[in-house]
């Protein structure tokens, strides 16, 4: 079931820039009360000051640290009294380990890279979910939106055989962590559906965030070319999913680019009212 977003409390991780910043702005514009978590806030952040002026709650939080998540949860509950929507956007990226191109083969990775990326992208996000889903379960209403990647998907070749979505992109260990996060999300959706909480996944696609353009030359040398999308392109699907609960859309993954295209086609074919 879809609900109005006005007055709903949304917690957004990785909120200081890129997709997280766009989502924070959009949620505020739709009358939501925003808790903006990021590891990188500081007292000189203009966006942080803007959020404070708009009544939002920007909080410093490393999602791998239990004490910091607990503190953020306590402050959010003290300020707003509940949580209606959680958007898990924070993640390590390929360029955090491979700054020249963001690309690495499986055998070219280091064990420590896998351990750290799983710690953030899977276990850290689960730590956040464990805390912030509790008010939703208690009030029997809410929506969790997990930002993943379509490299976690497989496609059917027929006859019971599948292949990876784009293994040539050398996107490890990132895509492996996102595969785990996607799987976790589907299981969680089934687990909390009876408590009327929705859990869905979005795949943003190639999106321009901090540092993305720095990889262009290195990726071009590998033969990888893509037009980066503005972070704002994820806003419509996230607002749509934020309005859901367990009686509505849940346990699904939304590939943002084709979803946006489908919505545009649908709008174009709707009869115009004079």
Image: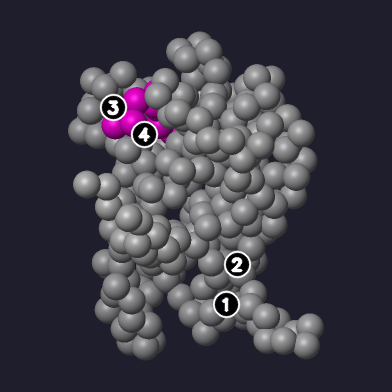
Q: Nearer the viewer, residue 207 or 3?
A: 3
Contact check, label 4 and label 2, Cβ < 8 Å: no
CA distance for labels 4 and 3: 11 Å
Rendered location of residue 12, percent (x, y): 45, 36
Residue 100 lies left or right of residue 120; in this view the side is: left
CA distance for labels 3 and 2: 33 Å
Q: Residue furthest front?
A: 274
Number of other residues with Cα within 10 Å of mark 1, as a class: few under 14, some 14 to 19, many 20 or more: some
Is residue 123 rendered magenta in the image? no
Residue 118 lies left or right of residue 215; in this view the side is: right
Classify mark 4: helix, strand or loop.
helix
Residue drawn at (64%, 63%), measured in percent from left and top?
Answer: 179
Sequence-wise, the earlier of marks 3 and 2 is 3
Residue drawn at (57%, 77%), measured in percent from left and top?
Answer: 165
For the rendered model, the colour scheme is: one colour
As drawn, the label of residue 152 is 2
Number of other residues with Cα within 10 Å of mark 3, as a class: few under 14, some 14 to 19, many 20 or more: some
Contact check, label 2 and label 1, Cβ < 8 Å: yes
Q: Quadrant of the N terminus?
A: top right
Q: Is residue 61 something one can see in this rendering?
A: no
Sequence-wise, the earlier of marks 4 and 3 is 4
Residue underneath mark 4: 27
Residue underneath mark 3: 51
**What stretch of residues is rendered in magenta?**
27-37
Number of other residues with Cα within 10 Å of mark 4, as a class: few under 14, some 14 to 19, many 20 or more: many
Sequence-wise, the earlier of marks 3 and 1 is 3
Sequence-wise, the earlier of marks 4 and 1 is 4
Classify mark 3: helix, strand or loop.
helix
Residue underneath mark 1: 165
* Position above or below: 53 against 196: above
């Amino acid at each position: 079931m879809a609900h109005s977003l006005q007055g709903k409390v949304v917690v957004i991780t990785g909120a200081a820039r890129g997709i997280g910043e766009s989502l924070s702005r959009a949620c505020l514009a739709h009358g939501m009360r925003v808790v903006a978590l990021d590891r990188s806030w500081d007292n000189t952040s203009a966006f942080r000051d803007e959020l404070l002026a708009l009544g939002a709650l920007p909080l410093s939080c490393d999602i791998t640290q239990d004490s910091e998540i607990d503190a953020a949860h306590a402050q959010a509950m003290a300020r707003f009294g509940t949580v209606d929507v959680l958007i898990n956007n924070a993640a390590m990226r390929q360029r955090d380990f491979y700054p020249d191109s963001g690309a690495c083969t499986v055998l070219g990775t280091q064990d420590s890279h896998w351990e750290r990326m799983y710690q953030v992208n899977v276990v850290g996000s689960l730590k956040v979910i464990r805390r912030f889903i509790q008010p939703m379960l208690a009030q029997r209403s809410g929506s969790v939106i997990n930002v993943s990647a379509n490299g976690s998907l497989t496609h059917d070749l027929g006859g019971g055989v599948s292949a990876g979505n784009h293994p040539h992109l050398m996107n490890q260990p990132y895509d492996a962590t996102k595969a785990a996060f996607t799987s976790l999300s589907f299981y969680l959706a089934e687990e909390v559906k009876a408590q009327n909480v929705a859990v869905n996944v979005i795949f943003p696609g190639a999106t321009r965030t901090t540092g993305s353009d720095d990889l262009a030359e290195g990726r071009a040398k590998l033969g990888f070319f893509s037009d980066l999308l503005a972070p704002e392109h994820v806003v419509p699907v996230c607002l749509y999913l934020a309005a859901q609960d367990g009686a509505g859309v849940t346990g699904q993954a939304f590939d943002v680019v084709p979803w946006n295209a489908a919505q545009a086609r649908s709008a174009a074919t709707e009869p115009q009212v004079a």
